[in-house]
Image (tube, coloured by chain):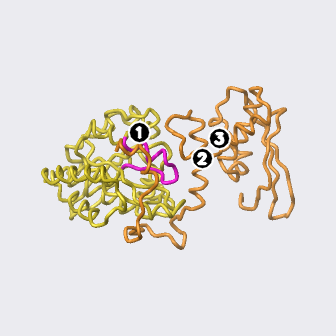
Amino acid sequence: MADTLQILKCGVRFDPPALVLNYKDRKTGKLRSRSMPLRNFNKNSGIDRIMQELESNPRHSKFIRLMSPAQLQRLLTIVKDKLNGLSLEASIARNNLMDQINPEENLNKVDPEILQRKKLLMDSSFEKKRIKPGDPQFEYNVEVDFDEVAIETSNWDSDNSEIDF
Amino acid sequence: MSTNSQPDYDKPGDEGEERVKIICLGDSAVGKSKLVERFLMDGYKPQQLSTFALTLFNYKTQIDGKTVSVDFWDTAGQERFNSMHPSYYHQAHACVMVFDCTRKITYKNLPEWLKDLRTYRPEIPCLCAANKIDEDMDTTKKSFAFAKKNNMPFYYVSAANGTNVVRLFKDSIRAALAYKHNSTDFMDEIMKELENFELDPIPSKVKDKEKETEKITQEKS
């Protein structure tokens, strides 16, 4: 059922807060728009809880499931920022930063909402590359020896911190 | 299912089978859970131990004709507190230490994890895995000094496409059993294999340290 719908665009409306989707119904070929009001959403709402509510809402879930969780979280965060008085520009800048994976950033130390966001980003990349049971290339046990390849020392070992090892 | 006490790994299980405990360590979001899930495959429901923020995956297997019950312990986000509750290490027989080969910081934090591990479990075998090699295959052409310096078997793995995941966990089970049976044969075997390939330019200081480690290892065995 959900497969017949294709999301074209998604965005938010601030007043009153809502998620807005433009999608195509493949069966009829029609372009449609759907607005999902974010009721009881305020500046203190947990993004996590709102996401769960949307995912389990019988009227919205088939649309929500088509969105990537990382994008859903981003849009809800922008709405929440707005409710907290942040300008749209400032919120987008803040969200762009959150959507980057910095290889030097210690994710053990960021707050749980940011960690979750980064995990969702990594998850979408993981899902893209994932070979699942049922896929033609799937094999349970994949053993590859890399030792024969000419090995160079990782430059991660070349700075001073290796003394700690 | 939720329980408040952890099993006693010194005692056999309900059907007389041997039990081992294998713990996973490493930074947030390096893919520890994804690796265990890839090994155990889809649909596996882990058990939550509610007292300690952790997830426990049980796996039964046959080793040399005997049933072995393996518990893989996963941190469930507890790594955010930078060190684990001592109960996480209690009675562990082996450790799988993971870093994300796309994020340098997760490699640089390994010494901290090892320090924490050795505070509670000075002797258990520890295997080191570079995860997410599918994101950057060049990683597999590189050697990482941390594993070799600390006498750890090293694996290039990917939870996404499955590369070396089964090998990593099967080896960890063999290492855990070998440790439990007080035998160092398994680790010796792996170390022999690792010594067969030379690492490119190693600073002389490091070489000396390594010689010392080798000496110590030899004296022990």
Mark 1 Cα shell of 10 Å, populated few (<14), some (14-19), many (≥20) = some
Q: Quadrant of the N terminus of chain B?
A: top left
- In front of the other: label 3 or label 1? 3
Q: SS for tag 1?
A: strand
Magenta highlight on residue B106? yes
Q: Position of residue B174 (x, y in %)?
A: 26, 58
Chain letter, orange: A
Q: CA distance from mark 3 to mark 1?
A: 27 Å
Quadrant position of residue B37: bottom left
Q: Secondary structure at mark 2?
A: loop
Question: Drawn colour of chain B?
Answer: yellow
Residue tagged by mark 1? B54
Residue B191 can be seen in this image: yes
Image side of residue B172 versus residue A68, left or right:
left
Residue B78 falls in which quadrant of the image?
A: top left
Picture layout, residue A158 above or below residue A128:
above
> Taking A28 as reference, is A110 left or right?
left
* Rendered location of residue A153, percent (x, y): 41, 59
Q: Indicate the amino acid at tag 3.
A: Met
Image: B193 above or below B109: below
Give the residue pinned by disc 2.
A101
The foreground one among A133 and A152 is A152
Per the image, the residue denoted by label 3 is A98
The span shown in magenta is B97-111
